[in-house]
Image: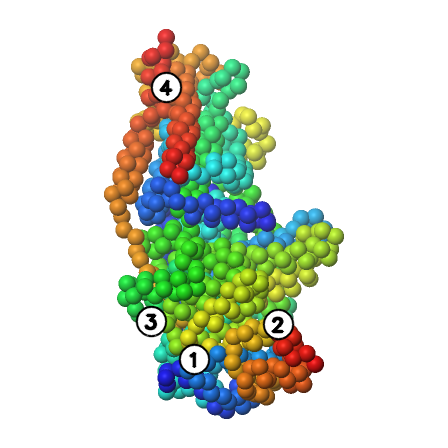
Amino acid sequence: MSHHLVEVRDLFFAYPDGTEALKGVSFRIGHGAAVALVGANGAGKSTLLLHLNGYLSTPRGEVRIGDTSVTRETAAQTRRAVGMVFQHPDDQLFMPTVGEDVAFGPLNAGLPPEQVERRVAAALERVGMTHVRGRPPYRLSAGEKRAVAIATVLAMAPDILVMDEPSANLDPRARRRLIELLLSFEHTRIIATHDLELVVEVCSRVIVLDDGKVVADGPARELLDDEALMLAHGLERPHRLRHLHPH
Amino acid sequence: MGIADWIEIGRMDELGRMDTPVHRIDARAKALVTLAFIAVVMSFPRREVSALTPFLLYPVVLLSLGRIPARHILKKILMAAPFALVIGIFNPMMDRQPVAAIGSFVVTSGWISFVSILFRFVLTVGAALALVACTGMNRLGAGLGQLGVPRVFVVQLLFLYRYLFVVADEGGKMMRSVELRSDGKRSLRFRAYGSLIGHLLLRSMDRAERVYRAMVARGFDGEIRVLQRSSFRWTDWNFVCGWLVFFIVARGWNLADGMGHCLARILP
Amino acid sequence: MHVADALISPAVGGTLWVVSGGLIAFCARKVKQTLQDNLVPMMGVLGAFIFAAQMINFSIPGTGSSGHLGGGLILTVLLGPYAALLVISSVLTVQAFFFADGGLLALGCNIFNLGFFPAFVAYPLIYRTIVKGQYGTSRAWVGAIIAAVAGLQLGAFSVVLETKASGISGLPFGTFVLMMLPIHLAIGVVEGLATAAVVSFVAKARPEALLTTPASGASVSLRPVLIGLAIAAVAIGGVASWFASTHPDGLEWSMAKVSGKEELESPGAGIHESLAKVQAKTAFLPDYGFKSTEAETVPSEHTATGPEAWPTVSAGTSLSGIVGGLMTLALACLIGIVLKARSIQRVHGNG
């Protein structure tokens, strides 16, 4: 259970040009939870995510994955436990073919070829993309790219999945497939997104970020239904909930 | 280079990913044979024409068995022809030593070497295009890596190829918005140029940073690793040996001339 | 300015391949040693950027034509010489593969002409010396123009040397130089302006992207520059002496032009010497079609100009060559058509 624990304590971060992106963020996420990170643009979501796999680091505050504190030395280990899917699939699919992209992670982890092969097959199967294995990434639709991007991370067998705007640019069918996929995962899932409808369906907990601080952290339905809270932080109440509780 | 050229790369890319007996031949074999072809063709003396003709067989066979439409390749050869034409046309001007006459037209040695240049051009360019159309950039890159080309360079080729379309797309979109706001003119004013290209550059650099981020997130440590290496099968050996023998024979003996002689003996 | 395969001999092409191959290997090693592994995606994406940028033109006022960025110099300003050379080489390689720009044999020449000079001569010796890191000032404009012109002139001159040394084109050295250099002077100015425009934009928007005075990884050792200049010196010396001994007709022609004689009447001495050379060559090369005349028919009746006899040619031999040549072409095309039809049939048959 401890591997799946994600803990952030008093995280402060400023960019080299002085912009203060995070001003004291703290939270704790347990095994198998599906948590949404919501907030207006510029609230600090992406910056926070980049701390979870050690890409960004700061002396002020701490990030712990499982029992290990995330530092430069433990970064490699962290990246095997935390799989990160970024916003633009084109930025993550950089190898000549889909198969090679999915194999990239396991190969870097030093796994032997037969095991890499097994991981690749399993990951592609999981997201339903086995049929595009030999294709170059630029020959995929947006939905296919998104699925493959997830596969590239699944192949590393992480305990925790972190995603930045996974449903952006997807047509309704692709988006529906994504939601089903997310619901089927048993990993701890941390999803930064504007798609509040998706949050209602997939996540049980919501952390609201505004101006680099956590302004709310609690059950998804409760927080998202709080119209005043939503509007105060650049969000709004999702439609789904409006139908359920017409005011 | 224009938008049409991008469509061309796209088409070449599609052709390169087909699956035919020629495509299945190891990329290294095809690359080496093509290089040998070009070297042999270029080793002929200046004024040789007829001996060159049998060499047409190589690109033609590759393209046919590879099911590559000939007009596609011919179009590219034509587009690339001007440079050779411009330089080559000086030969007939400079070298006026007469050699034969057809009716009242005096064929000078200069014309012969000019035709030779043109012919060589078609052969070498045709062979290179056939190589790429029958192999595809990805297999070719991997093959080059196995042949000993430095890994850093092969990776560079593959990354460049991968992001070619993406960046071109961005550039194309920027140009479209320029066109829409400037009466359809496709040439920018100089001030706008620096800014537009500058923006494209910054976006490219940002993209590179995001790619790097994704690579690091999947454990990248500076080394790009490959899953499998291809090995030579007997068809590949046959391919290499067969063509090399043909090149040697066709270089040593003027096969076209021979055929002409046979014809002269057969016909009354 | 890409050199085409058809004009390069295997000897020259092969030599330049070795040189360029060595350069690439050297730069690859240097790039690895910098330990900047974020260079990998940066180099790839910037290569794609150069491709896209070459598609976009700006109009040159007063001429009605337009220009665009070549990219060698700006790549060096962004990446340093080693990485820049690799990027330029990769762009040229893709162009050779997909656009028949130059061809494979000449790729080595093109990499040297278009990559070595901007990255290892124009940038370190000229651009950096003039601009001294002050990218936002008018120094940057001056430096860019002079550096670009110098780089392109050196490249253009190399093209001439390589083509002449290959001996396939009959274009005389002097004419060739007069054709290439002025044109590339203009191209160089355009390149310099385009480069400077982009640099000045980046200097305002993101100055940290531009190289400051050399960090340890980007410092250029003089060795590649010296090697390159040495090769150029040897080549020039070799070509000059070769010219003096074997190709007086080129100089003759220029002289004739200068002295005002009509083109058609090249000096008798000139033809005589070239005839002698042709005969020497025909005796040397057994597969030269004309030589197999001994057993063949009567020499042609079409003797035309003066006392200088025809070389050992007969209409009969040339005819067999021509007929044979045409037949071979037809046969090759026929084979192609048959093979293609059969392979398509095979696919449909199995489908």
| Amino acid carrying mark 2 in the image | Ala
Mark 1: secondary structure = loop
Q: Secondary structure at mark 4?
A: helix
* Residue designated by label 4: B260
The residue that appears at 67% across and 48% down in the rendered structure is C65
Q: Are marks 3 and 4 on the same chain?
A: no
Q: CA distance from mark 4 to mark 1?
A: 81 Å
Front label number (3 vs 4)? 3
- The C terminus of chain C: image quadrant: top left
Q: Residue at x 47, y 68 (%)?
A: A181
Q: Are marks 4 and 1 in contact (CB under 8 Å)?
A: no
Question: Could you give the CA–CA distance between mark 2 and mark 4, rounded to whole angstroms?
Answer: 69 Å
Quadrant in which residue A171 is drawn: bottom right
Q: CA distance from mark 3 to mark 4?
A: 65 Å
Find residue B3 and report its horizontal and vertical position in percent.
59, 49
Q: Nearer the viewer, mark 1 or mark 3?
A: 1
Q: Contact, CB < 8 Å: mark 1 with mark 3?
A: no
Q: Which residue is mark 2?
A: C205
**What residue is rendered at 74% in x and 52% in y?**
B183
On residue A75, the disc is none
Q: Position of residue C181 (x, y in %)?
A: 55, 48
Residue under numbered circle 1: A32
User: In the rendered structure, which disc, 1 or 3, sits on the residue that comes first in sequence?
Assistant: 1
Point out which mark residue A109 bears: 3
Kindly identify the amino acid type of the residue bearing the numbered disc 3. Ala
Q: How far is mark 2 from mark 3, CA to CA?
A: 38 Å
Give the secondary structure at mark 3: loop
Residue B7 showing in the rendered view: yes
Q: Secondary structure at mark 2?
A: helix
